[in-house]
Amino acid sequence: MSKQKSSSSCLFCYIDFISILFSAVVLSCVTKYCTQIYVTCKRSNVML
């Protein structure tokens, strides 16, 4: 019984780790994308 519980909690940790990692990757991609858009807008404003 206790073994089953520990394995499920281990799985929870793993899922938690994956979700945190996924969030970090998404956040970095969004930041990169936003920065790119911002820089492009700045450049086009300077050109205009």
Image: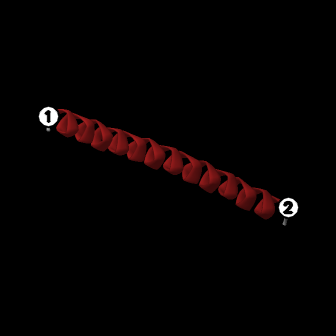
Residue 35 x, y percent position in the rendering:
35, 39
Q: What residue type is labelled 2?
A: Ser
Q: Is residue 21 left or right of residue 43?
A: right
| Rendered position, 3 above or below 38 | below
Q: Where residue 47 is drawn, which disc sits there?
A: 1
Residue most extreme to the right:
2
Q: In this view, does 13 lie above or below 41?
A: below
Number of the label disc, if any, that sits on residue 2: 2
Q: Is mark 1 on a helix, strand or loop?
A: helix
Residue at (36, 44) in percent of width and height: 34
Relative to the observer, which residue lies in front, 46 or 19? 46
Vertical relation: 6 (above or below) 48:
below
Report the front residue among 31 and 47.
Answer: 47
Task: Single out the residue that lies furthest toward the left.
Answer: 47
* Frontmost residue, 7 versus 29: 29
Quadrant (top left, top right, bottom left, bottom right) of the C terminus: top left
Tell me what residue is drawn at x 68 percent, y 52 percent. 13
Q: Which residue lies furthest to the front in this view?
A: 48
Q: In which quarter of the image is residue 42?
A: top left
Which residue is found at the position 56% from the left and 53% from the top?
19
User: Which of the two discs, 1 and 2, labels the residue nearer the N terminus?
Assistant: 2
Q: Residue 34 carries which label?
A: none
Query: In the rendered structure, are the residues bearing label 1 and label 2 in contact, judged by CB atoms less than 8 Å apart?
Result: no
| Label 1, label 2: how far apart the Cα atoms are | 67 Å
What is the secondary structure assignment of the residue under circle 2?
helix
Query: Local crowd at mark 1 within 10 Å, few (<14), some, or many (≥20)?
Result: few
In the displayed structure, does residue 38 sit left or right of residue 22? left
